[in-house]
Image: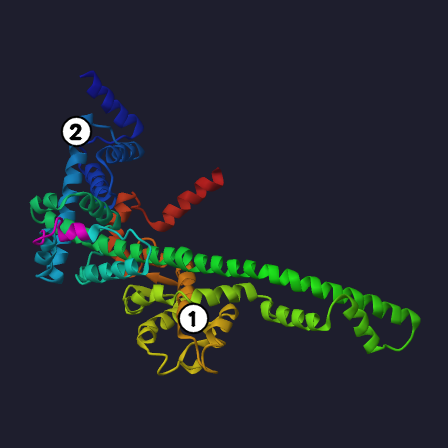
Amino acid sequence: MTPYNHAQEIRERFGYHDYGDRKWSREFRTFLYGRAWTHAEGPVALFNHAVTWLRRHRGLLPGGSVLARQVSEARTVAERRLYESVAKATHKADRTLAPALVGLLERPEGKRVSELERLRTPPTKSTGTAMVRAMERVEEISAFALGRVNLSRVPVNRLNTLARYGQLSKAQTIERAPEPRRTALLTAVVRQLEAQAVDDALDLFAVLMANRLISSARRASEKERLAMLPQLEKVARILAKASKILTEELDLVAEAGTALDVAALWAAVEEAVPRTAVSGAVAMVDALVPEDDGSAEAAMREKLALRYNTVRPFLSLLGESNALGAAQGGKRVLKAVRRLPALSRRRVKERRLLPREVDGELVPAMWRRAVFSNTKLPQGAVDRDAYVLCVLEQLHRALNRRDVFAAPSNRWADPRARLLDGPRWEAMRADVLAGLSLNEDVGEHLATLTRGLDAA
């Protein structure tokens, strides 16, 4: 009886609680079940959190096997609650949705893999055609409309863990799972697949813009400028000789204080360089070196406009996609993107594009020459190809700034959408606070932290 006597003395002297105490046992179970539900942790991590909670709240630790059984039971209850909650929400949204999801596990006749496996395969090439397939994959998965399944009461990390398990499982393994686990797995997997498909499409768009379009256009522009260098060197030497003689003659005139004799000045220049060569050199410099400072960037955009055929196949799918949204800073760009399908279908040779039909404020200075001053088009016409590439470049930048974002998405989502607020927070509040052991009043909790900080 000595161990029990010691436990009794510890309880009396230090204020510890017996593990079987009804009140403290209920509080401990509330914490344990709340933690198991809101945190997708393994049994060891949950066991360690349980021990920490008991020590912090002065509870006598039970035998290891007793606590392990309770942890296992809490995890089992949490998993069962997860499957039932997801499956119930799926059936409530649409009775035909669950059978449609199960249909993805079937292998079509003549195919080697199931439909689920096909949809799980991401794009592997960075071409316009691959972008079309990526957007079609987004549309195919979005057709299930899993956004209507209300899973606001299910912790996001639990859903993500369930989806990751389903993503790594073969179709046959999911098909053999009992209900409601099978429906929950399929719902989580396809819901996650939709976000992944959007991410894959936008990742491909970013690679396409950066590597296949902008970088290649920059290389072509730099190559063209390097090709002009020998011509520039030749005319630069001519102009250097002429300007040197002009400077020397003008200095002599200034020192002598005599009137300027233009004929004599030209005669001195023509002794070194013919007059026609000087005129030709000036014309060559005017043609090769534009007056504006951003000529290199403007020339690159003219080369980029020639890549229209690369992006033309996916303009309609991109402009009509419901996955894109915008913050205040990206609404103008997104509005222009929505007009891309109409522009791609327009026959500009028969009906030219006018400035009033495009958003001129969206065209930066580096694009104006390519968009509004194409010498191959009638005066006043807008270069449709250049304007489309201009909009896509603005979209690429807005996506990187998250002024334009995607939903559902993991990598291109609106950062503010991750914050729980309003009804969503109220639905999760009790479980989250229980799992974090935040059961006291928020004012008292903050006051305790403040006192500890001040004392430290």
Who is closer to the viewer here, 33 or 309?
309
Say if mark 2 contacts mark 1, CB within 8 Å: no
Q: Give the image location of residue 89, x and y in percent.
A: 14, 57
Is residue 85 visible in the rendered image? The answer is no
Q: In the rendered structure, does residue 110 fall within the stretch colored magenta?
A: yes
Q: Residue at x 51, y 66 (%)?
A: 299
Task: Identify the residue under disc 1.
Answer: 386
Q: Residue at x 26, y 47 (%)?
A: 157
Task: Identify the residue under disc 2.
Answer: 66
Q: Give the image location of residue 77, x and y in percent.
A: 14, 42
Q: Residue at x 52, y 58 (%)?
A: 222
Instruction: State the residue lying farthest toward the top.
Output: 2
In this rendering, the answer to whether 214 lies above or below 178 is below
User: Magenta segment range?
Assistant: 107-118
Horizontal side of residue 108 vs 329, given as left or right: left
Q: In the rendered structure, does residue 9 fall within the stretch colored magenta?
A: no
Q: Quadrant of residue 263?
A: bottom right
Q: Quadrant of residue 316?
A: bottom left
In this rendering, the answer to whether 282 lies above or below 452 is below
Q: Residue at x 23, y 62 (%)?
A: 136
Circle 2 crowding by C-alpha within 10 Å: few under 14, some 14–19, many from 20: few
Q: Main secondary structure of the magenta part?
A: loop
